[in-house]
Image (cartoon, coloured by chain):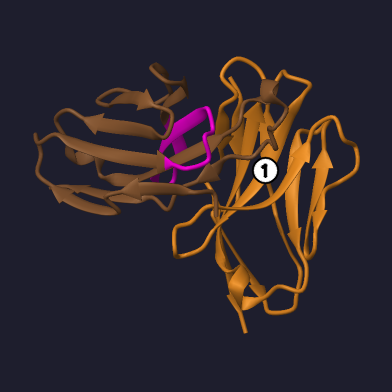
Chain colours: A orange, B brown
């Protein structure tokens, strides 16, 4: 069974600085999706960035980028020029493309942003 | 806005009472999911549906049942609520891969907070 591990329960960053959130996963599959979701205090789950496993190029969305290391099964999220609005819970998620296409989540990292 | 509505958004109930949470979508997506979110556990899959009247269990399905009589509605029922079912419940939807419309991501509702006393 696939598992997703986020080893940092909490992280903090100064406004305008850069922070990296870690995520590792375990799978025997070769094709899958990886995601980072953001959950602000409003509770809404917001997709930050997605990565298809067959793509070697790291995904980027404005200030958000990932470092996808397929062989190491690592999928970290880098937030550049951090803003107060980035404060939230961040969840790493793995989606299998076989059987039930389920989305499997890590336990989350709470990011605090200080002015 | 993915067109997903959960109701009720907040509910307090007593142990042993039945509870039904409703997820309604306007996107005509075939796949629908119920997750629960608890501190230290992230989101865990309870049940999912891949079409009308087609449902299956997730990793934490004990104590829950679901029904899907029409594409747009997916109901989660706690037949006899227990305090361990106090949680935030999320509904999610997506398109299947074989329709060529799958973007990979799930779209989530705003969550329903359930407290069982």
The x and y percentages for residue A11 are: 60, 63
The x and y percentages for residue A72 are: 80, 33
User: Between A105 and A10, which is closer to the camera in this rendering?
Assistant: A105
The x and y percentages for residue A87 are: 57, 69
Q: Chain of mark 1?
A: A
Residue receiving disc 1 = A35
- For the point 47% across and 31% down, the residue is B32
State whether the magenta stretch is mostly helix, strand or loop.
strand
Q: For residue B56, which quarter of the picture?
A: top left
Is-magenta flag for residue B35? yes
- For the point 14% across and 34% down, the residue is B18
Q: What's drawn in magenta, residue-wise?
A: B25-45
Residue A115 seen in the figure? yes
Left or right of residue B23: residue A23? right
Is-magenta flag for residue B32? yes
Label 1: state its secondary structure: strand
């Amino acid at each position: 069974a696939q598992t997703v591990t986020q080893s940092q329960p909490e992280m903090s960053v100064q406004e305008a600085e850069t922070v990296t959130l870690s995520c590792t996963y375990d799978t025997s599959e070769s094709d899958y999706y990886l995601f980072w979701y953001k959950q602000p205090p409003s509770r809404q789950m917001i997709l930050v960035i997605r990565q298809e496993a067959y793509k070697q190029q790291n995904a980027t969305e404005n200030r958000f980028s990932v470092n996808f290391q397929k062989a190491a099964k690592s999928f970290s999220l880098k937030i550049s020029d951090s803003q107060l609005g980035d404060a939230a819970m961040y969840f790493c998620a793995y989606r299998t493309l076989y059987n039930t296409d389920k989305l499997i989540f890590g336990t989350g990292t709470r990011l605090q942003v200080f002015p | 806005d993915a067109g997903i509505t959960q109701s009720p958004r907040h509910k307090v109930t007593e142990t042993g009472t039945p509870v039904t949470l409703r997820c309604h979508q306007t996107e005509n997506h075939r796949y629908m999911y119920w997750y629960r979110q608890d501190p230290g556990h992230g989101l865990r899959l309870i049940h999912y549906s891949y079409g009308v009247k087609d449902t299956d269990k997730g990793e934490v399905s004990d104590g829950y049942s679901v029904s899907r009589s029409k594409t747009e509605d997916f109901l989660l029922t706690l037949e006899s609520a227990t305090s361990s079912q106090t949680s935030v419940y999320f509904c999610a939807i997506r398109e299947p891969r074989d329709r060529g419309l799958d973007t990979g991501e799930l779209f989530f509702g705003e969550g329903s907070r359930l407290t069982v006393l």
